Amino acid sequence: MKLVGLTGGIASGKSTVSRLLQEQQIPIIDADKIARQVVEPGRRANRQIREHFGDEVFLPDGNLNRAKLGEIVFADPSKRKILNGYTHPAIRLEMLKQVLYQWLLGTKMVVLDVPLLFESKLDRFVGTTVVVYCSEVLQLQRLIKRDGLDETLATQRMRAQSPLSEKVELADIVIDNSSDLTQLTSQVKNLVRQITPGTGIWLLEYLGPQVLFAGLVAVIGRFSISLFSNILSKSIKT
């Protein structure tokens, strides 16, 4: 099974690309979605966050007050590191479970949608990395419009991640999201054609070289036995 890592920067358009890939029937394992699940009430990370950050980052129903927590961790890298220490192990474990599930289904290709793909070193576990890119100016404009932030807060959140230019340097494939949805959709369709493995490659990755080799040996063995039997039969008749 081919693993593809999809990443980008905040407000670069990664979520839109992920949605377009889903429309192309590509399974997506969404790290952001999993991150929300692992901090739900009753989960270990939820308890750890309350112990360290206090009740003020929680809503009355026990769910995280994401806006309040975001204000704290985006302003202080040390606190952001502590939060990641609580959530990242649980996120990675759930992602692994979902990858194994897709493998058992015989899925050809799965996309891991991970905002911090390179920062968390998860790029080492995928075959192809894809970065969704736009200029910092456009990224800032989109973030301010999307989240209703002032320029200072928006810039602070952008600076909490590696610059998109650095991610572009590390990527195997870059999708430029500087234009409109039509152009982006066209790029995503081209991407799918480019990265989808053929049946032979899929069998090799899914079954593994050893299994395929054993199957080949078995086929050759059966053919040899059949051939020997025919020769022996003809010799007896002669």
Image (cartoon, rainbow, N blue to C red):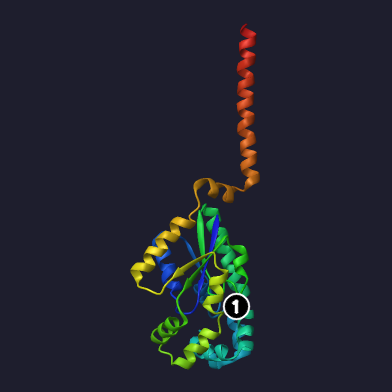
**The C terminus appears in which quarter of the rendering?**
top right
Q: Position of residue 169 (x, y in %)?
A: 56, 71
Q: Position of residue 96 (x, y in %)?
A: 59, 64
Q: Alpha-carbon neighbours of circle 1 within 10 Å: few (<14), some, or many (≥20)?
A: many
| Residue at the spot 55% in from the left edge and 73% down from the top edge | 167
Along the line of sight, which residue is nearer the eye, 133 or 216?
A: 133
Q: Is residue 4 above or below residue 85?
A: above
Q: Is residue 85 left or right of residue 2?
A: right
**Residue 229 lies in what quarter of the image?**
top right
Q: Is residue 59 left or right of residue 182?
A: right
Q: Position of residue 53 (x, y in %)?
A: 60, 90
Along the line of sight, which residue is nearer the eye, 223 or 174?
A: 174
| Residue at the spot 64% in from the left edge and 30% down from the top edge | 221
Q: Position of residue 74 (x, y in %)?
A: 55, 88
Q: Is residue 90 above or below residue 60?
A: above
**The N terminus appears in which quarter of the rendering?**
bottom right
Q: Is residue 72 left or right of residue 184?
A: right
Residue 22 seen in the current view: no
Along the line of sight, which residue is nearer the eye, 200 or 95?
A: 200
Q: Is residue 20 above or below residue 166?
A: above
**Residue 180 lies in what quarter of the image?**
bottom left
Residue 195 seen in the current view: yes
Amino acid beneath label 1: Thr
| Residue at the spot 48% in from the left edge and 55% down from the top edge | 196
Q: Which residue is the site of mark 1?
A: 87
Along the line of sight, which residue is nearer the eye, 172 or 43?
A: 172
| Residue at the spot 41% in from the left edge and 68% down from the top edge | 19
